[in-house]
Image (cartoon, rainbow, N blue to C red):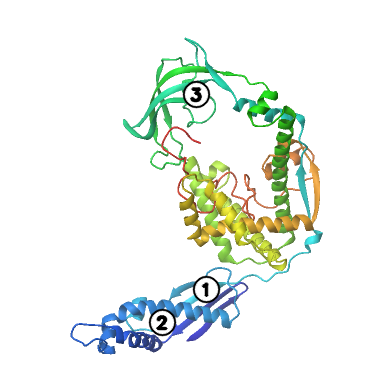
Amino acid sequence: MQITETLNDKLRREYTITIPRKDLDDKLTGKITEMQPRVQLKGFRPGKAPVSFLKKTYGKSMMGEIVNETINQSSEQLLKEKAIKPATQPRVDFVNAIDSVIAGQADLEFTMKVDLMPDFTLANLSELKAQRLVADVEDESVDEALKRIADSQKSYSEKGEGAVAEKGDAVTINFEGRIDGEAFEGGKAEGFDLTLGSGAFIPGFEDQLLGAKAGDEKTVAVKFPENYGAANLAGKDAEFAVKVTAVKGANEVAIDEELAKKVGLESLDQLKERVREQLRGEYGRASRTHLKRRILDSLDEAHSFELPSGMVEAEFNAIWQQVEQELKNEGATPEDEGKSEDELKAEYRGIAERRVRLGLVLAKVGEQNAIAVNQEEVNRALAARARQFPGQEKQVIQYYTSNPQAMAEIRVPLFEDKVIDFLGELIEVQDKKVARDILFLDPDEAEEKLKAAGGDEKPAKKAKAKGDDKDTAEEKPAKKAKAETEAKPKAKADDKPKPKKK
C-alpha cells in the first residue's frame, strides 16, 4: 500500500492511496483457495475444481467485496498510523475506474478526504455568567387554571327548539366527507359531539356550523392543511355533508368543594395547592429554557476556534432543507422574509456554525467532567417517546433501536441536558424576575421585549432562531424548520383521515 499526502491544511487532510492490483489478486486467490474444498461444480469431483477455473467463475463478484474490504482496512490503517481523529466519515473517491479494478486491469487507487476534530481549550467555565428569568405564581394564574379545570368538567344541555349554535356550544352531528366526489376512509361519523371553537376539527369546519339549528343540513367546504398527518388528504379540498341533530349549551361549573371532589381531591384548598404546585413546575421548566439559552450564548461567546468544514456543511444542509420545505409549504420565497436567498443562507450558515461549535464545546465539557448517559436513562427516554404514538409503541421502539442515527436523537439531548445542568451549578447564574407573559415567550422574543422595555439584556450575536431551545444549539431556523431534525415514524396514531386534527 502506497500513501501520498496531497493536502495538509488546518483541519483538512487529503491522501491518495494505491493498492497494486497484484495485492488484490493475491487476496482473491487466497479467498478462492479457502473456499475450494467446499465447492461442487458439474464436471469436477467435489472440492477438485481448479483455482484458475474458480477465479474465472467467481472472481468478478468476489473482487467487489475484496475492494470494499481493502478500502476499509487501508483507511483504518491510515487513520491509526497518522493518529487522526476524524470529525466526519472520511470521503472516498476512486481515481481509476472501478470496473477496471474489479476486472484486474488496474491498481486500486483512491483519494481519502478527512476533516479533523479541532484541538481547542475550554474557557474558564467558572468565570461564565448567565441570566435566568423567573416569575412568581400569582393568585390570578391559579384562578385561571381553576377556571380551565371547571370548564373541562362542563356538562351540556339542549338549548331548545329553534336555538342557534354559538361559540362555546356543543353540537351533535352526523357527517360524511368527500374529495372530488369520492368518500374517504375515516371521513364519516354519526352522533359526534363537537364543541364549537374548540379547534378540534380542521380550520374552517367549526366556523361554518355557527348559527346552525337542530335539524339543519349543511355542506361544509374545507381544505386539509398541507402538513396534515394523512398524506393522501394533505392539501386537498373536501366537502362534508353535515346534519345537526342537537344544539347544546354549556352548564357552568362552580369552583367549589364539589369541583375538587370531582377531580379526586378532598377540598378546594387542596385543589388550589395542587394547581399552584403544577404551575410552579411549569414556571420552573420555562425558567430552565431561558437559562439554557443564556448558558449556550455564554459558551458561544467564550469560544472561538476553527470548525470542521464537513460538519458545518452537513448541519447547514439539514437546516436549509427544512427551510426550503417550510417555504414550500407556505408558498413563500426568501424575499417574503425580506432577504435574498444568499442573505438567508448566510444567516442559517451562521446558525449551523453555532450548533457545531456548541456541540463540540459541550462534548468536551462532558468528556473532561465524566458526564455520561447510562442505558437506563436512554431506555426511559425511548419509552416516553414511544408513548407519544399510542398503539404503535413496539414499532417505534424497533425503529429507534434498529437505527443508530435515530437512537442518537434520543441520547444526545439527554447528554446535553446533563451538561447544561452541570454548568448551571458551576457558573454564576443571575435571576431576573419578570412577568408571566415574558417568562413563557421564546427566549429571543423575551430578550427583545426586555430590551425594548429598558432591560439589561444583551442582544444575541447569533442569527435569530426563534421558537426553539431544544438540544445543543439546536435552535431551529426562525419560524421555519418546525419539523424535528430526527427522522421519526411517519405518522402519529391519531393522524387519521378524518376532520379531527388532534
Q: Earlier in the sequence, mark 2 or mark 3?
A: 2
Tag 1: amino acid: Lys
The spot of residue 307 in percent (x, y) is: 63, 65
In the drawing, does residue 85 fall left or right of residue 35?
right
Front label number (1 vs 3): 3
Query: Is residue 250 positioned above or below 35 on the image?
Result: above
Read off the residue under disc 3: 207
Q: Label 3: how many residues lie within 10 Å, few (<14), some (14-19) or many (20+)? A: some
Q: Earlier in the sequence, mark 2 or mark 1?
A: 2
Q: Label 2: how many residues lie within 10 Å, few (<14), some (14-19) or many (20+)? A: many
Query: Is residue 26 positioned above or below 119 on the image?
Result: below
Which residue is drawn at the image coordinates 66% and 59% (left, top)? Answer: 358
Whether residue 50 is visible: yes
Q: Are marks 2 and 3 in contact (CB under 8 Å)?
A: no
| Residue 108: mark in rendering | 2
Read off the residue under disc 1: 113
In front: 258, or 106?
258
For numbered disc 2, what is the local secondary structure? strand
Front label number (2 vs 3): 3
In space, the residues marked 2 and 3 are separated at their CA atoms by 69 Å
In space, the residues marked 1 and 3 are separated at their CA atoms by 59 Å
Whether residue 354 is visible: no
For numbered disc 1, what is the local secondary structure? strand
In front: 352, or 223?
223
For numbered disc 3, what is the local secondary structure? helix
The spot of residue 119 in percent (x, y) is: 67, 71
Query: Is residue 387 positioned above or below 33 on the image?
Result: above
Residue 256 sits in quarter: top right
In space, the residues marked 2 and 1 are separated at their CA atoms by 16 Å
The spot of residue 102 in percent (x, y) is: 34, 79
The spot of residue 191 in percent (x, y) is: 43, 24
Tag 2: amino acid: Leu
